[in-house]
Image: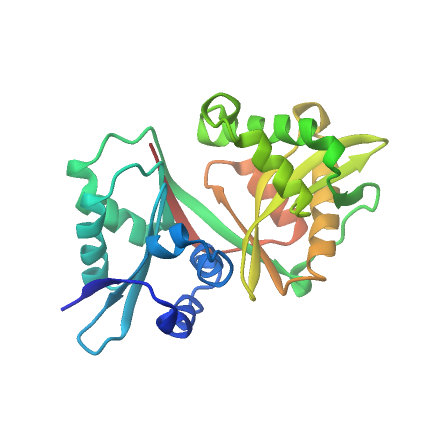
Amino acid sequence: MVRVEPFTSAREQDALAYLAHAPYANVFLTYLILFDRSPAAQHALHLALDDRDTIRGIAYFARQIAIAAQDPAAIEAFARIGLAHHGEKMIVGPRTETAAYWSLVRHKHERPRVIRDRQFVMMIDRSLMLPYDRNVVARRARIDEWPAVADNSASMIAAELEYDPMRSSPEFTSNVRAMIDRGLWWVGESLGRLCFFCNVGPWSPMTAQLQGIWTPPEMRGKGLATASLGAICDRLLELTPTLSLYVNDFNEKAIALYERVGFKTVSEFQTILF
């Protein structure tokens, strides 16, 4: 018998140990437990526990739903919570677990806008890094560059997630500015022009997840993305043991870019968008 209880700080170490078995797949949940102390985030976290009070799964129910649970009974227990939850814009996580959860709630859920059925989770560490050209300046974005960062981030989201955040998210540009202030947006610069963009998303003691990866169309086909991403990874691996990301299985050009830098696939995700 598996039951669901709200997460409490008393179970923090047990929860982190559970998530550490799949550090790249579970970086978002690990980040929430370690670094997002807001009441809203903490109240959205739930644990699936068996009769011996052993953790069988961890889930987050907010505008984004994320589940880590290999036990089918835990996924079923989370589905009971999910059937009463409203307002999510995304369900994302390990492919098998996300698909199992969705199969249990889809009959009472609105139709998804987009399903990204198979996404590769990739990682890199210092030993996997491949040589790259040193013809690009890799650095953190400056606050005066926020319009370019916001415009290119919006273009990436429109291409990958099929919506325009400039229109649908009034806080989008302020969030970009805040992330630049925190040093989380990185750019590649070539001959005085910004040629590459990415940001650091959730992180843990094991890894930092790269997001928002985008090369402006006019800068493509020149080797600038490989040089930029290689240089950014080089810098960031001074701060974290590994880096990770996830990418749609049909995005062959992006996958080829990541492999040229040295990333390897370690697991698979699925994302359901509403």
**Splitting the image into 4 quarters, where does residue 76 fall?**
bottom left
Give above or below for 166 relative to 86. Answer: above
Quadrant in the picture for the N terminus: bottom left
Frontmost residue, 127 versus 270: 270
User: Farthest residue toward the top?
Assistant: 167
Q: Is 161 positioned to the left or the right of 221 in the image?
A: left
Q: Could you tell me if residue 130 is visible in this image?
A: no
Residue at horizontal 24 percent and vertical 50 percent from the top: 100
Residue 102 in the image: x percent, y percent? 24, 44
Frontmost residue, 81 versus 1: 81
Residue at horizontal 24 percent and vertical 49 percent from the top: 101
Give above or below for 31 relative to 151. Answer: below
Q: Is 215 positioned to the left or the right of 204 in the image?
A: right
**Splitting the image into 4 quarters, where does residue 193 fall?**
top right
User: Farthest residue toward the bottom?
Assistant: 52
Residue 274 in the image: x percent, y percent? 33, 32
